[in-house]
Image (cartoon, rainbow, N blue to C red):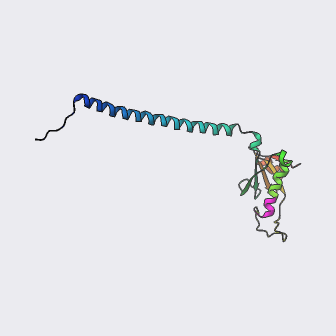
C-alpha cells in the first residue's frame, strides 16, 4: 500500500506565502538596483553636460590646431598649449609649436620636401594664427588675416 503524502491546507498556504514573499523581495531589490544605476547614469550625464557648458575660457583656449594646408578641411596636427602665464604669449607659443611640427616634417603641405639641412629641418611656410569660434587657436600655412575672416575666424597676431 502506497500512500501519497499530502500537505495540509495551512502548510500549503504557508509555503505559497513564503515563495510569493521571496519573489516580491527579489523584484523590489531588482527595482531598487535599476533605480540606483539609472540615477547614477543620469547624474554622470548631467555632470558632464554641465562641465562642457560651463568650461572656463582658459580650458577652451588650450587647444592648438596646426593645419597642413590653407584649407579648413585639410589634415591637422592637434596639440595642447600651456597657458600664457606659464610660457609667455600664448599666440607666440602656438605658432612656435606648429613651426616645430613643420620643421620636424610632421606637416608637409603639398610637397614631400626633403630636409633643408643635415640636421633634418624641413621647410617651414609663413604661418597665420586664427582664433576659431570655440576660442581654440588654428595655425594655417601661407594665408593672411583675410583668410581667417573669410572662414569665420578672428585673426590674431603673436606679440
- Give the side of residue 14 with respect to residue 147, left or right: left
- The answer to whether 69 is drawn above or below residue 38 in the figure is below
- The answer to whether 20 is drawn above or below residue 156 in the figure is above
- Kindly identify the residue that appears in the image at 77 percent across and 66 percent down: 111
The foreground one among 64 and 24 is: 24
Residue 132, x across and y down, in percent: 76, 46
Is residue 141 in view? Answer: no
Q: Quadrant of residue 29?
A: top left
The foreground one among 5 and 71 is: 5
- The answer to whether 81 is drawn above or below residue 105 in the figure is above
Residue 87, x across and y down, in percent: 84, 49
Total marks shown come to: 0
The foreground one among 35 and 53 is: 35
- Kindly identify the residue that appears in the image at 79 percent across and 68 percent down: 113
Residue 149, x across and y down, in percent: 80, 47
The residue most toward the bottom is 118
Numbered range of the magenta stretch = 100-106
The residue most toward the left is 1
**Main secondary structure found in the magenta portion:** helix
Residue 1, x across and y down, in percent: 10, 41
Is residue 42 in view? Answer: yes
Amino acid at each position: 500500500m502506497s500512500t501519497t503524502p499530502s500537505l495540509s491546507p495551512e502548510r500549503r498556504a504557508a509555503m505559497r506565502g513564503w515563495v510569493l514573499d521571496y519573489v516580491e523581495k527579489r523584484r523590489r531589490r531588482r527595482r531598487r538596483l535599476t533605480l540606483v544605476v539609472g540615477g547614477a547614469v543620469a547624474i554622470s550625464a548631467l555632470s558632464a553636460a554641465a562641465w562642457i557648458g560651463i568650461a572656463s575660457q582658459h580650458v577652451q583656449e588650450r587647444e592648438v590646431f596646426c593645419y597642413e594646408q590653407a584649407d579648413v578641411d585639410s589634415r591637422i596636427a592637434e596639440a595642447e598649449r600651456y597657458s600664457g602665464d606659464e610660457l609667455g604669449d600664448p599666440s607666440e607659443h602656438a605658432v612656435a609649436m606648429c613651426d616645430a611640427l613643420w620643421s620636424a616634417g610632421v606637416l608637409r603641405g603639398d610637397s614631400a620636401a626633403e630636409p633643408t639641412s643635415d640636421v633634418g629641418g624641413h621647410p617651414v611656410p609663413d604661418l597665420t594664427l586664427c582664433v576659431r569660434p570655440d576660442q581654440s587657436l588654428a595655425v594655417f600655412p601661407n594665408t593672411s588675416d583675410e583668410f581667417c575672416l573669410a572662414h569665420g575666424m578672428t585673426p590674431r597676431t603673436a606679440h
